[in-house]
Amino acid sequence: MPLSGNPIRSKIRAATDNAVTGLAILATLLVIAPLLAIFGYLIYKGASSVNLDFFTKIPKPVGEEGGGMANAIVGSAVLLALGTIIGVPVGIGGGIYLAEFGRGTKLANAVRFTADVLNGVPSIVMGMAAYALLVGPQVSWLPFLGHFSAFAGGVALGIMMIPTVCRTTEEMLLMVPHAVREAALGLGVPNWRSVLSITVKTASPGIITGCMLAFARVAGETAPLIFTALGNEYWSLDLNQPIAALPLQIYKYALSPYDEWHRLAWAGALVLIVLIVLSVSLVRYVTSRGVLKGAS
Amino acid sequence: MSEIRTFQPQFQQQKPSEGQAYAPQPGGAPGPGGQMGDQSDSAIRAFLRARGNSALADGGFRALMVLCGFSIFGIVALIAIVLIYRSGLVWHNFGLRFFYTYDKDPATGQPLYWDPVNGHFSAVPFLYGTLVSSFLALLLAVPLAIGVAIFLTEMCPKMLRAPLAFLTELLAAIPSVIYGLWAVFILVPLLREHVNPLLSKGLGWTGLFTDDNPTGLGFVSAGIILAIMILPIISSLTREVMIAVPHSQREAVLALGATRWEMIRMGVLRNARIGIVGGVMLGLGRALGETMAVAMVIGNTAEIHRNLLANGASMASVIANEYAEATSDLHRSALTELGLALFIVTILVNALARLLVWAVTRGAPAQAH
């Protein structure tokens, strides 16, 4: 241990300490800078193009001014609704299994671990698997199969939501005190009823938080949609047809050579980020004032 | 309803016997238990009987929840099976050689890495692109992320801690495609005009930075945008493991007369290092599979260049660009094989990372956020 009384040495130590403090502050500033730059440019470039037309019109053909992304916004809503319908119940169910039935068992640990690992699987691989399962195979007597469709995109998004929802649900359920469960069971409430009406209900702010986090995460996903939902320049609400999505549209327009499309891409990105930041902030707000903290 | 009621006597026989473990005959569940049930017909019990037993409902509910939990195994297995099945053609034709050799033009000796039209397929340029861009990203992100984590856990005034943590986490919430959009229109021009000439001038002698690419796209652009994207993951996990280091460790080092940095180095980082490695690996896992932003700025040419300012392609970016319009079965199969490799590698990296983080935070007390 450097505990000598040497004055030069202690000066060096103090200087190192200050230098490290400075570097840590610098690192923090360097990390905040891109964030501010991204948000700044999104507002600077996007805000002027976000108008009523943007929300009510579909894209105009190349070369024409104006147009909007109404079809992409609605398409994203459809895809996310489908994803939520698939992902949230299964995810919550998995979380209930982990917290209520499998607690402490090896099997539950394996499920938990697999969920964490699945969370890290690249979204492009998810999209590829969804393609190989739902878009590639031709089965004439089954609907939705064999071609690009909103259905395939929604399934891909739903599967991506499962691990996040599952793990947050579990964490939230674990925070519910045992006494609450015992009180319910002691009154003769059947176990399933106790889990759903007492435990899950107690933890519901946290569980909703988890669902919204998962929602915010997949709302911006592009990679799993490229070869499932594919994108669409026109109005479509048909689950059996390719459908437009905001992230897909941003991707396509950003790489196009047309200024008009670049403008729309920035506007779309601004709308998307506002949607995501709103849901994340709402989650923050709810969790910071609710009894159940700890979701992050 | 009648079916459910048949379970009722069983329920009443078992419950009292469990409660009376100290009774003379604890093992004789059906006999005395049944009597108990018949004797003490309290209001609660009558109420319970009236509303029916729930063994069937309970069993069904439990089975459903177990099914939901196990569906996660099912998903992973399904992805693996589908990818293996779909990449069979390339595996059959090339085997492992797909990952380490490539065709050469017989006339000129030039490498033909990837030419779907003429049937040349090799994963080599994409492995190179993925590794180089991810490595660059880690090189930039790890010191910054650890610096942020140190600042937020050990130095930052309490007032600033929550907002700063929120801001870094917000960075994780920005979608990949928006990073890509920003990179294409803001970052890449900036690099092209100002940074790349400097890199070329200062570090050109290494051969790694030759400013001959007029687009500004390439490995460096991809590495920088990836670094920004993986930073929040690494810093939040580093923070988590640093918080998990017991306070007594810090106090012990401080009591020996250490400065704050010495305390952080010896008391915190040393104890948290395994967890930090885990966080870095999670970041690596994300960087390897990150698609949209990379696809938008890496340049998308299946070539290998020592020059980091040149265009390249990563495994994820080539899949994103070509899979939907793959020209032949072999082409699609080759892309699927790349996806399978990505799947396996990210699973291994993530599994290892989770184990490392888990090893550190396992015994930690409840964290005060």
Image (cartoon, rainbow, N blue to C red):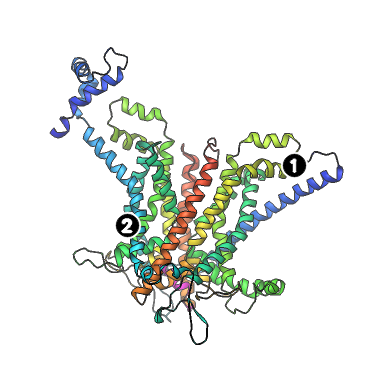
Q: Is residue A12 visible?
A: yes
Q: Where residue B55 sits in the image (x, y, percent)?
A: 23, 32
Dot 1 falls on a residue whose secondary structure is loop
Residue that carries the numbered disc 2 in the rendered image: A82
Q: Where residue B21 sits in the image (x, y, percent)?
A: 31, 17
Dot 2 falls on a residue whose secondary structure is helix
Both labels 1 and 2 in a single chain: no
Compared with B182, A6 (above or below) is above
The answer to whether A185 appears left or right of B136 in the picture is: left
Magenta region: A247-258
Q: Label 2 is placed on what type of residue?
A: Leu
Q: Where residue A42 sits in the image (x, y, percent)?
A: 53, 65
Quarter of the image containing the N terminus of chain B?
A: top left
Q: Label 1 is placed on what type of residue?
A: Thr
Pointer 2 chain: A
Quarter of the image containing the C terminus of chain B?
A: top right
The residue sitting at the top extreme is: B24
Residue that carries the numbered disc 1 in the rendered image: B259
Of circles 1 and 2, the one toward us is 1
Q: What is the crowding at mark 2: few (fewer than 14 residues within 10 Å), some, or many (at least 20)? A: many
